[in-house]
Image: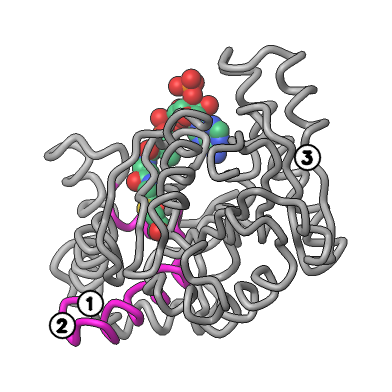
């Protein structure tokens, strides 16, 4: 039934976004199965979620009991075949079109419910490309969360020319009513609403550092103190991950051919050097 309540969710990927999505789903009382390619990555994903749940307890947002119950609702697998009974799957793998396309092909074969929602958390890959990798493009939508997922209240809902109204409605209901997020809708254009505005800003800040216009500290300080942003653009690039910023910029440039989306050489060099930001301890800043 199209209106059947979603209580069994799958999340593909337990990196910073996948772990955050799995956590908010478990906190919203759904049964969550998380896919990772290896046991080591699954274990790292589980500890990332447990650390974040602990943070929820220490900041008074969760009780000890809620934390424990959320952790019981999370299971991990390295076999996508285990997703057969899922009613909604949110794919949060790396921002790589070939990898995501393969995942959608597999999910389409495995997930049996014809009304299941197959969602991608992609930041920049047109959802149509993922939908057309499946035999059932009407089940495919974009559900784009923001980092840190437990903290930021937005989900961008992206429908394609092929997404069915029932699937759109189920996805919107799940994000809004079950997870308690605010939902905005976007057309299926690379970058959607937020990244179409945010990424040129981050790239401009990186160009400013590159040209010696101002220091990274002063650029960040200026935007925090001058516009009341919670963090400046270079610290935010580190939080998002410089490889992800580059991947999004590449996709947006591919779609629009606008120079403002083209990743500057400093960003390319930092990614080549493995300075990917907060997740590896070193980006524009160092993280202990
Ligand atoms: N998990 C759970 N809770 C967390 C958390 C996490 N990972 N990180 C922070 N929190 C909670 C803290 O517990 C704290 O809660 P409290 O106020 O109840 O004590 C609250 O969030 C604030 O955290 P902190 O006091 O530690 O730190 P800050 O006040 O400096 O806030 C921040 C940190 C929430 C990251 C804030 O700086 C912020 O919102 N920055 C902007 C982030 C942003 O713009 N994200 C979007 C990136 S774009 C994106 O994700 C899209 C993709 O496609 C690129």
Lower position in the chain sequence, tag 3 or tag 1? 3
Q: How is the image coloured?
A: one colour
Number of labels in the image equals 3
237 and 170: which is toward the camera:
170
Q: Earlier in the sequence, mark 3 or mark 2?
A: 3
Q: Which residue is mark 2?
A: 258
The picture places residue 190, in percent across and down from the top left corner, at 30, 71
Badge 1 residue CB within 8 Å of ligand 1: no
Q: Residue at 61% x, 50% y: name it.
A: 88
* Residue 43 can be seen, yes or no: yes
The single residue placed furthest to the front in the displayed view is: 1
Task: Name which quarter of the figure residue 40 lies in.
Answer: bottom right
Q: Are marks 2 and 1 in contact (CB under 8 Å)?
A: yes
Secondary structure type for disc 2: loop
Q: Is residue 204 magenta?
A: no
Residue at the image point whose x is 56% and y is 85% from the top: 98
Q: Residue tagged by mark 3?
A: 74
Q: Which residue is mark 1?
A: 261
Q: CA distance from mark 3 to mark 1?
A: 38 Å
Q: In the rendered image of this protein, does residue 156 appear above or below residue 282?
A: above
- Cα gap from disc 3 to disc 2, whole angstroms: 42 Å
Which residues lie in the magenta part? 232-260
Along the horizontal axis of the image, is 78 left or right of 53?
A: right
Crowding at dot 3, Cα within 10 Å, few <14 / some 14-19 / many 20+, comes out as many
Residues at marks 2 and 1, CA–CA distance in whole angstroms: 6 Å
x%, y% of residue 6? 62, 38
Label 1 crowd (10 A; few <14 / some 14-19 / many >=20): many
In terms of secondary structure, where does tag 1 sit?
A: helix
For ligand 1, the image quadrant comes to top left
């Amino acid at each position: 039934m199209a209106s059947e309540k979603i209580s069994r969710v799958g999340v593909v990927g337990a990196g910073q976004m996948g772990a955050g999505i799995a956590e908010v789903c478990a906190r919203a009382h759904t049964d969550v199965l998380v896919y990772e390619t290896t046991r080591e990555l699954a274990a790292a994903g589980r500890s990332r979620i447990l650390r974040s749940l602990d943070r929820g307890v220490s900041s008074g947002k969760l009780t000890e009991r809620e934390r424990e119950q959320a952790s019981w609702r999370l299971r991990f697998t390295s076999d996508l075949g285990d997703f057969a009974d899922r009613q909604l799957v949110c794919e949060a793998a790396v921002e790589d079109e070939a990898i995501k396309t393969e995942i959608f092909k597999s999910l389409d074969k495995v997930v049996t419910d014809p009304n299941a929602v197959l969602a991608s958390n992609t930041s920049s890959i047109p959802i149509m490309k993922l939908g057309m990798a499946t035999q059932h493009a009407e089940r495919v939508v974009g559900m784009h969360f923001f980092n840190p997922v437990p903290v930021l209240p937005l989900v961008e809902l992206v429908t394609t020319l092929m997404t069915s109204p029932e699937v759109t409605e189920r996805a919107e209901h799940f994000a809004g009513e079950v997870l308690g997020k605010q939902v905005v809708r976007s057309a299926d254009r690379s970058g959607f609403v937020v990244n179409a505005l945010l990424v040129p800003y981050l790239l401009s800040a990186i160009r400013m550092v590159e040209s010696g216009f101002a220091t990274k500290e002063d650029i960040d300080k200026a935007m925090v103190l001058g516009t009341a942003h919670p963090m400046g653009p270079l610290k935010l690039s580190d939080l998002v991950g410089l490889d992800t910023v580059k991947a999004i910029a590449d996709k947006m440039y591919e779609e629009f051919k606008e120079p403002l989306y083209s990743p500057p050489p400093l960003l390319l060099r930092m990614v080549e050097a493995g300075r990917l930001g907060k997740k590896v301890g070193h980006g524009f800043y160092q993280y202990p």
